[in-house]
Image (cartoon, rainbow, N blue to C red):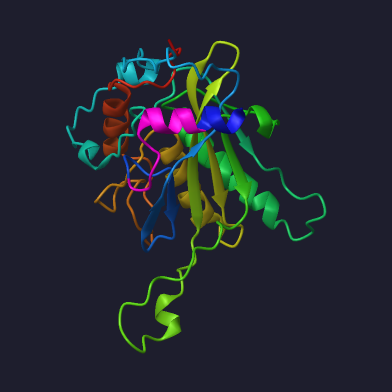
Amino acid sequence: MGWLCALWLALILGWSAPGKSAPANLSTNFVSTSFSTANFSTANFSTEPATQLPPPAVHPLPPFLARWQDSEQQGDYFDAIEPTAAGYLVWSTFPVRVYIQPPDAADITGRTQAWSEAVQQALQEWAVYLPLTLTPDSATADISIWRAAPPLQPLAPQTEPNQPLIDRLPRVRAAETRYEIFVSAPQSILSHRYTIHLSPNQTSSYTLATARHELGHALGIWGHSPLPTDALYFSQVRHSPPISHRDINTLKRIYEQPTRLGWELR
């Protein structure tokens, strides 16, 4: 029955075919961004026709965002954010639980420790704005961050005769952030969770920048900024920017929007 429940949820949300609403993952190679469709899973909810998704509603703002005022009025890039059929991807239960893959005990080079420290620093930067907590259990995490290169993408389609194969090879990606919509038990709450694959083959400074960027996606900024001075800029720059006022202005506007996530099915 589980796959029937998932299919029901997908059809209700209008995600039964590729290209509908926002993509379920954002892949970052700091040259371009690719998209794909959603994953669905469910837990202990009815497939009866009477079951309905919750209507979109606004959650109370987290404390920091409720107080946030940009005195410099630097603007935002809210118009670049992709809503989903479930609404904007906001968290409503805090603290958000984040799992970071621990260092490899057999690593004598210290690279996995450096990776972990960079990711934890990015987490601390975002924790200023939203309540976040580390959890040692990936099974119960809201956001799981893994020390692994993103899955390989297929060859690009041939666009002209005798096109060299090298022109069709996918770019190497530094990270991928993917969300999943599901129904949590026992309250039947429409929920979401994220998986982030973050390459171990970057310097600490680039790992920090990439983790900062991907965590921004996982906290609700499902889109990219057009300005290189924002952490959510679509491409990597030589001197990676910190979280900007524009990033937080955008985050606040997202959390002011109605969503179906975090509400009980009817």
Q: Nearer the viewer, residue 172 or 159?
A: 159
Looking at the rendering, which quadrant does residue 117 occupy?
top right
- Any magenta on residue 12? yes
Residue at the image point whose x is 67% and y is 43% from the top: 101
Q: Is residue 76 left or right of residue 6?
A: left
Residue 125, position in %: x, y?
A: 47, 35
Asked if 103 appears above or below 59 in the picture, the reply is: below
Asked if 207 appears above or below 2 in the picture, the reply is: below
Looking at the rendering, which quadrant does residue 120 occupy?
top right
Q: Nearer the viewer, residue 124 or 103?
A: 103
Q: How many labels, in total?
A: 0
- Any magenta on residue 266? no
Q: Is residue 3 left or right of residue 50?
A: right
Q: Which quadrant: the N terminus?
A: top right
Q: Nearer the viewer, residue 257 or 41?
A: 41
Q: Is residue 76 left or right of residue 4?
A: left
Residue at the image point whose x is 56% and y is 55% from the top: 204
Q: Which residues are magenta?
A: 7-19
Residue 214, position in %: x, y?
A: 46, 45
